[in-house]
Amino acid sequence: MAAPRLALALPFLHMPTKQSDIGLIGLAVMGQNLALNIADHGFQISVYNRTAEKTEKFVAENPNTPGGLVATKTLEEFAASLARPRKAIILVQAGKATDAVIDGLVSVFEPGDIIIDGGNALWTDTIRREKALKEKGFLFIGSGVSGGEEGARFGPALMPGGDKAAYKHLAPIWNAIAAKVDKKTGRPLLGAKPGKPVKGGVPCATYIGENGAGHYVKMVHNGIEYGDMQMICEAYHLMKDLLGLKPAEMGEIFSQWNKGALDSFLIEITADILKQKDPASKKAFVDVVLDTAGQKGTGKWTSVNALDMGVAAPTIAESVFSRCLSAIKEERVAASKVLKGPKPKKVSPAKKKELIKAIHDALYCSKICSYAQGFQLMRQAQVEFGWKLNFGQIAQIWRGGCIIRAAFLQKITEAYAKNPKLANLLLDPYFNKTIQKAQENWRKVVSLAAENGIPVPTFASALAYYDGYRSARLPANLLQAQRDYFGAHTYERVDQPRGKFFHVDWPEPTRPQLEA
């Protein structure tokens, strides 16, 4: 048994004469797929995993990539195999594991070498790491990578941030491996196969900004993704409990929706899921899946950051809270036996078609508001962190490869092309006109949901956001008066310039007004 073992170990013993264009550490599913994507585009890539056997097996199973895979057994071998300036992608668990790998690379790399974190890192960690590495002479890029396993293999959306000069070294690889979209329509170019990537098109990769900008934009992408998924689930819930439709019927409806304004990856896979039979019971697959949803934290990060910066992002936050509520399954089952509400009323067949259109419109309007919140959050972040974000380019790179890829993003791209300083997507003529046309249906759906006891938190919060944003005067005047009453927090007046504050001396019998 020793001879085969020795043969498999040979890649570790004999390094190729040509040094690799780039390296990758972390051979879980995402790491393997990204490495193969890079090799498919003609780049030689060195790979390293803490478990050497995994590296060995991966390279042995993929001997014929156009660029070539190079297995390395130690970090020293890994560093020696790379052309200067060395470039190494880290794809390990975010947090302490990433810090440990960075520390290891620092011990074998030289000043001027480039470290790329491709994981779902918290942007503040990326800012910290970039600063610490810069002090030691190393260059650091924090790059969002979106698209899941398939995206990593055949073309993800890539959101790099960090040292701009360092990105110039990475850009040829990132542009090559990114998803591609048609230049005119913005639609994804499909058909990539192992060893045969798609050719032409516009790459879904662009330099985002300094230090943590790339990972921040990826975080917002994921927050928007949370919203998209929850909105789709609410549409499904309404069709199931209000309209009494079967999963296969709903699957056909989503397939039709995917041919219009809602054309997107998430609508496409929803249609496929709803048509799927459970392999074990032969029932509709969706009916046997337990109604508890997991989360990895990026949606929460987006919501917390929105609160920290004082940006209204209620629809994204509600999507996170919906997952939290789903997690207490046993408690909800117990509550269902005690807490009473209206039972959904049967809808006549004649009205079903009308309500399906209304649900479509509610979903689309809510989606517009959710994206408006995400882009407003990024707008404030660039002020907070000193970034210069190009929102049109961000929308462009989300058109392909990533989970939220959708025809809808072409409209956002066009909106920012017309007005790069657009304050809110709702103010763009296309989105304004769309909501004006569809809002009656949107309001009808939210009302019907409330009347029938069906929770639609993202539909309802998006509508409240829209109505709040279009209100010239909100009841916050009373709120601020309350704050002044119990805490002397002061207030501004409608008949005085902004920035001039006053306080009423409430305990004083005459209650005089004082300038703050």
Image: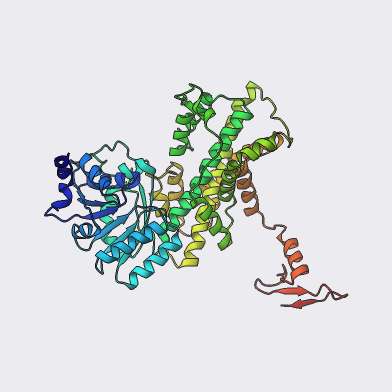
In the image: residue 216, left or right of residue 507: left
In the displayed structure, 272 sits above or below 170; it is above
Residue 288 location, x and y as percent? 53, 28
In the image: residue 202, left or right of residue 304: left
Quadrant in the rendering for residue 516: bottom right
In the displayed structure, 282 sits above or below 269; it is above
| Residue 481 appears anywhere in the view | yes
Q: Residue furthest right?
A: 509
| Residue 185 appears anywhere in the view | no
Q: Residue furthest left?
A: 17
Residue under the image location 35 percent in, 43 percent down: 151
Residue 191 location, x and y as percent? 30, 36
Residue under the image location 49 percent in, 37 percent down: 262
In the image: residue 473, left or right of residue 198: right
Residue 88 location, x and y as percent? 28, 57
Residue 515 location, x and y as percent? 73, 78
**Front residue (pair 358, 94):** 94
In the displayed structure, 21 sits above or below 54; it is below
Q: Residue furthest bottom?
A: 515
User: On the rendered image, what quadrant is the N terminus found in?
Assistant: top left
Number of marks drawn? 0
